[in-house]
Image: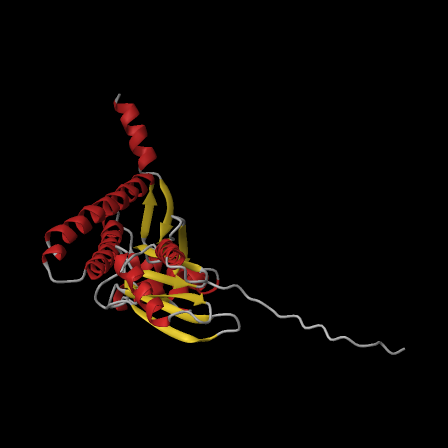
Amino acid sequence: MEKLLLQVEAILNYPLFKLGESTLTLASLSTFICAVALVFIAEIIFRRQLTRRVLQRTQLHPSMQYAVGKISGYLFIAAGLYMALKVVGIDLSSLAFIAGAVGVGLGFGLQHIISNFVSGLIILAERPISIGDRVQLGEATGVVTKINLRSTIIVTGDNITVIIPNSDFITNKVTNWSYGDPKIRVRLPVGVAYGTDLERLERLLLEVGAEHPHVLRDPAPEVFFNGFGDSSLNFELGVWTTEAQLRRFQSEVNFAMERKLRQNQIEIPFPQRDLHLRSGTLKA
């Protein structure tokens, strides 16, 4: 038994390679892996306790609480990895050459990852977008559900998850419908036939806005006369809402407008063209 223990000890203490003045053995490598695992587990517990016991008792906005918790967690991991290296006896000065080589690799092969990482820090610090915001970036429109250091996750109105690199939010034009104020105004166009009683039309459209449960009463709905079209008088019903599912909201209001106008016998015209035929003779 004693001989077996000596063999196991010899295997664990067998030098794998050297880092400067430090010799890395199987035992020290195993200790380092366990220490790293404990660091990540401890970071999850630390971040949860920080959020529940400290940040939630402050006056910080929930998105700012999330950002502070995330950044604190990353700092905790960095400190934990440093301590793990010290525990296994690795001389950090011996890692200078490796750090230089990694720096060259980051500069060439990982530039997009570094760009997204830095962009994530900017988003968490400046908060141009926050969790729960309705945003539009290119063709992607949805609600922000999670902000990581590399990417941001939004969920569309069709419950499709879109993962967007953070650098896109910094370098591209982003529409944030919830920035500073969750309510937005939606303009819904409608055309009516020439000769329609416009005062009655305005009253009916305002009734549509007042009857919908997701239309805000303050600010109140408004009707805009946009101009004279080829076949119709063009109007817009402007309503304010905090509804996240905008496509469904617009569809519901459009249905309500069509039903209201049909019930009151107000015509919604379609484009028409008059064809005039002129008689005459053709010359060869």
In the displayed orientation, state which residue is furthest to the bottom: 283
Tag count in the figure?
0
Q: Residue at x 35, y 62 (%)?
A: 135
* Vertical order, 100 against 39 (above or below): below
Is residue 213 visible to the viewer in this orientation of the structure?
Answer: yes
In the displayed orientation, state which residue is furthest to the top: 1
Residue 22 in picture, x, y percent from top left: 31, 51
Among the 4 quarters of the image, the one containing residue 197: bottom left
In the displayed orientation, state which residue is furthest to the front: 279
Report the front residue among 181 and 86: 181
Q: Quadrant of the C terminus?
A: bottom right
Residue 235 in picture, x, y percent from top left: 40, 70
Q: Residue at x 27, y 46 (%)?
A: 36
Among the 4 quarters of the image, the one containing residue 256: bottom left
* Vertical order, 157 against 266 (above or below): above
Q: Quadrant of the N terminus?
A: top left
Residue 186 in picture, x, y percent from top left: 34, 65
Which scheme is used to colour this image of the protein?
secondary structure
Q: Residue at x 83, y 76 (%)?
A: 281
Residue 75 in picture, x, y percent from top left: 23, 58
Among the 4 quarters of the image, the one containing residue 168: bottom left
Report the front residue among 70 and 277: 277
Is residue 115 visible to the viewer in this orientation of the structure?
Answer: no
Report the front residue among 258 and 185: 258
